[in-house]
Image: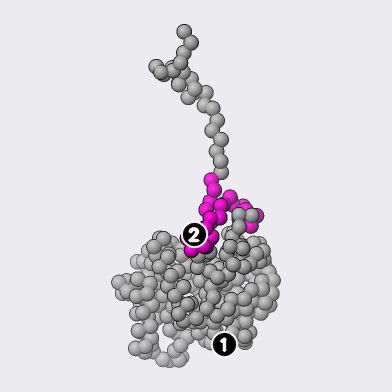
Amino acid sequence: MSTLELREVSAGYRDRTVVSGVTVTAGRGSWLAIIGPNGAGKSTLLKAVAGLVQCTGEVVLDGRPAAGLGHRERARAVGYAPQSPELPEGLTVTDYVLLGRTPHLGPLARESGRDLRIVRDALARLDLDGLAGRSLRTLSGGERQRAVLARVLAQQAGLLLLDEPTTGLDIGHAQALLDLVDRLRRDEGVTVVSTLHDLTLAAQYADQVVLVDQGRVVAAGVPGRVLTPELLATHYDARVSVLTAPDGSPVVAPVRREVVAEADPVSEATAALRPDSTVDQ
């Protein structure tokens, strides 16, 4: 399964609605970036697609309502990497990534040689093969983030839901991770839906961008249509210039508030006493 349709989806927690009336489509092999200010509902929307929070409206996977899919079938179709995962105690990196193969195993089955090869490939792709035997607890924040994505890759789902996948990563590892995801969607038809705080990275990698504010979609389309100074000022309360990268994608550059220098009477008095100062005789 690799296409996603949201039809008037609303979701939240207990009696609080966080996202309302979201309608959006991500086609096979596309990359949809969900952006918006803190608290806009981006993570809740991903959880609704993953089946982790209650929602109304319809989540449709490859033309089938997700509500009609069994838990194991949905887990084989959708891979979800949360922003702040709770990692099990006592597992090595390899053990953890092997959990991604669970939806493909029978109730009492053990992992096969093929499963182990898939895990080794996921570790190598994310530059984790040297950490395969390490305990999860000993990893840095960036290494843990890559381990989470390796587990999702090992799941081999047609739809990847990535909640801030570059959190904690330096620019080199962030680019390597996004390049890998981009290759997966191009070569294997994987569909990607991600939240991203870095608007320039969103513009470089996503085909379509959806801007969410206060739980509602306020703009959607190609990056150049959504990432405008006017929209970002309105919904982020941000001062930015939007430049153009060599590949034609938008670059969102923050603009510092202008500081007007005020006269310092102490400095002026000190300057008047310097030997080179002009003093009336």
Q: Where's residue 170, x and y in %?
A: 40, 60
Using the image as rendered, state which of residue 106 and residue 265 is in the foreground: 265
Where residue 177 appears, x then y in whole percent?
42, 69
Q: From the viewer's side, name the closer residue of 61 and 187.
A: 187
Crowd tier of the residue under label 2, counting other residues whose Cα lies within 10 Å: few below 14, some 14–19, many 20 or above: few
Which is more N-terminal, label 1 or label 2? Answer: 1
Left or right relative to 201: residue 144: left
Snapshot quadrant of residue 187: bottom left
Res 141 visible: no
* Rendered-image quadrant of the N terminus: bottom right
Task: Relative to 271, say whether 10 is above or below.
Answer: below
Determine whether label 2 and label 1 are within 8 Å by CB: no
**What residue range appears in magenta?**
231-256
Residue sitting farthest toward the top = 281
Decide whether residue 251 is among the magenta residues.
Answer: yes
Q: Which residue is mark 2?
A: 245
> Quadrant location of residue 195?
bottom right
Helix, strand or loop at disc 1? Answer: loop
The picture places residue 128, in percent across and down from the top left corner, at 34, 72
Q: Residues within 10 Å of mark 1 (few under 14, many from 20)?
A: few
Residue shown at 62%/85% (left/top)? 63
Q: Amino acid at mark 1?
A: Gly
Q: Tag 2: residue type?
A: Ala
For label 1, the residue is 70
Percent x, y of residue 139: 36, 66
The number of numbered discs placed on residues in the rendered structure image is: 2
Residue visible at 54% across and 60% down? 250
